[in-house]
Amino acid sequence: MKDTNVNNVIETKGLTKRYGHLLVLNHIDEVIREGEKVAIIGPSGSGKSTFLRCLNCMEDPSEGSVYFQGVDIADVKVDINVHREHIGMVFQQFNLFNNKTVLQNIMLAPVYVGKRNLRRAKCHNFFLPLTNLFRKTKKTPVEITTTKEEIVKKARARAIELLQRIGLEEKANVYPSTLSGGQKQRIAIVRALAMNPEVMLFDEPTSALDPEMVGEVLDLMKQLAEEGMTMVIVTHEMGFAREVADRVLFMDGGVIAEQGTPEEVFGNPQCERLRGFLAKVL
Amino acid sequence: MVKFLKKHWMDILVLAAVAVLLVMGASTIYHRFNFAKKWGFFEQYFITDSGYKDLLKGMKNTGIIALLGMLIGLVIGTLIAVIRVIPPYQKLVRYAQKVCAVYVAFFRGTPIVVQLLVGYYILMPLLGVKLSPVMSCVTIFGLNSGAYISEIMRGGINSVDVGQLEAARVVGLPFSVSMLKIVVPQAVKNILPTLGNEFIALIKETAVVGYVGAVDITKYFQDQGSNTYEYMIPYLVMAALYIVIVAAIASLVKLMERRLAKNERH
């Protein structure tokens, strides 16, 4: 299981996805390295979104494996939730929690995970005297350095800091239904950031936005890219892909038909499908 | 004044006609059914002989059965609904879903009276459970409304955008927590009018608990009728009492709906 290079944040091996008889992804082997910005382009129905959703197992792969930091998260025995904490994801439809305020939206996951870890540590320490009876080398209890209140406080401070970063701190206590699309998407991005993810997956983050709001979201994503975040972006914004991406994947018919640096892909496309696609969108 | 009359003459006419009809009806009843005498019996039993104390006990029982039944029903219904929307990848989940389907089919497929009779006179002695009539009614009404609420809740859960669940799963919340913190609260908001309806239906259904010896509003008035050999006024009062209770609850539900809708408007 640990046979892959840890510098590869995500690695897929023989990733295949079928819906019934429909083959959506066909044996994809791909590596996303640390700090890399990968843009995925392609016509609709080519499997871009499915590929992205397989990377954090929102869609379970039919075959093949997905390694995240060397662990196969497509394996059913792996606790997927622990790994998903480290993979941020942003949706086309924002998907902010409608029944929570903006601040609660951002705090929910960090507080839950913090409290869960605290609970697990306490539980571990509680049963340690008993389990140590059967061990040759005795284990020492885990040190508990935080309390529930502290976790909430920290999460709140972090959430407010993130909101200040995108200039929406005065929206902290409103419900998402009152926000514009661009604001919602930026909050969705910082909600993912609140978990300090290793990699961010973007599933067409600007496709549901009004044209005038696309800019603010792309600007935030550019900032993230400059900070060295590992990013995988499914996008129709060719200009953005050319500017930000280190590598562009062109998907078609469930396979990666062509890939390379933006200059190669946009400047000197090799395969016929990519040429046809670029002629239509550019 | 003239303007008012010109605008509303039709309404005034209709209201006047209704009033005349009501008065005529009332006076017919009053004379034909010897109302004054019957009212005397009613007053004698209800007030002078302290019948109202028993009525209060009956109302308390109706309230207990309906409220606790609804609470149990909500818990069971939510549980069943959540189980029935889990993607059925594991065998255990599939079996649990089958069990839930059978449960719902059973409780929706038999009348509540039959469930009460079977439960109170057959199952409980068989299992050796000893409960007071009221508490056994609470249990059976809870189980019964659980089946109905599970279907309502399932509709509500399906009405919440699937992206809400995905967004919760993506940040690392497990299925159960995402359901309880994100999806179910939104589902409940969507189905609140239907839940209110279910509660009102439940209150009216409690009228059959007399079958197993629990005294509720209906049973009280039946008893009063058979004790005084005079049924008309007790039954009319009973109907009016149910209407008042249901109207009060309907307005409460409306208030709650407005409360919960606040994160949509602002």
Image (tube, rainbow, N blue to C red):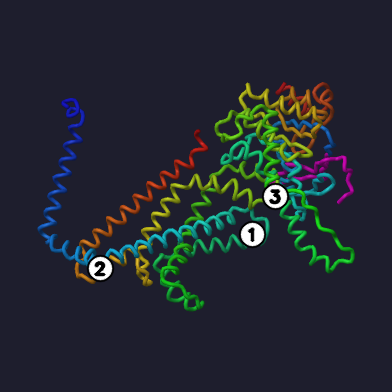
Q: Nearer the viewer, residue A203 or B42?
A: B42
User: Could you give the CA–CA distance between mark 1 and mark 2, rounded to whole angstroms?
Assistant: 52 Å
Q: Which residues are magenta?
A: A1-30
Which x, y percent locates residue A89?
71, 38
Is B157 placed above or below B96 here?
Answer: above
Residue A35 visible here: yes
Say left or right for A261 vs B111: right
Chain designation of label 2 = B
Tell me the amino acid under the disc marked 3.
Lys
Q: Nearer the viewer, mark 3 or mark 1?
A: 3
User: Could you give the CA–CA distance between mark 3 and mark 2, rounded to whole angstroms?
Assistant: 59 Å
Q: Which type of secondary structure does the marked residue at label 2 adopt?
A: helix
Say left or right for B91 vs A196: left
Chain designation of label 3 = A
Q: Which residue is mark 3?
A: A115
Q: Quadrant of the C terminus of chain A?
A: top right
Residue B93, label in figure: 1
Is B114 placed above or below A211 here?
Answer: below
Tell me the amino acid under the disc marked 2.
Gln
Q: Quadrant of residue B17?
A: top left
Residue A249 visible here: no
Q: Main secondary structure of the magenta part?
A: strand
Say whether residue A20 is magenta.
yes
Q: Which residue is mark 2?
A: B224
User: Could you give the CA–CA distance between mark 3 and mark 1, rounded to whole angstroms?
Assistant: 27 Å
Chain designation of label 1 = B
Q: Which type of secondary structure does the marked residue at label 3 adopt?
A: helix
Which x, y percent locates residue A233?
74, 32
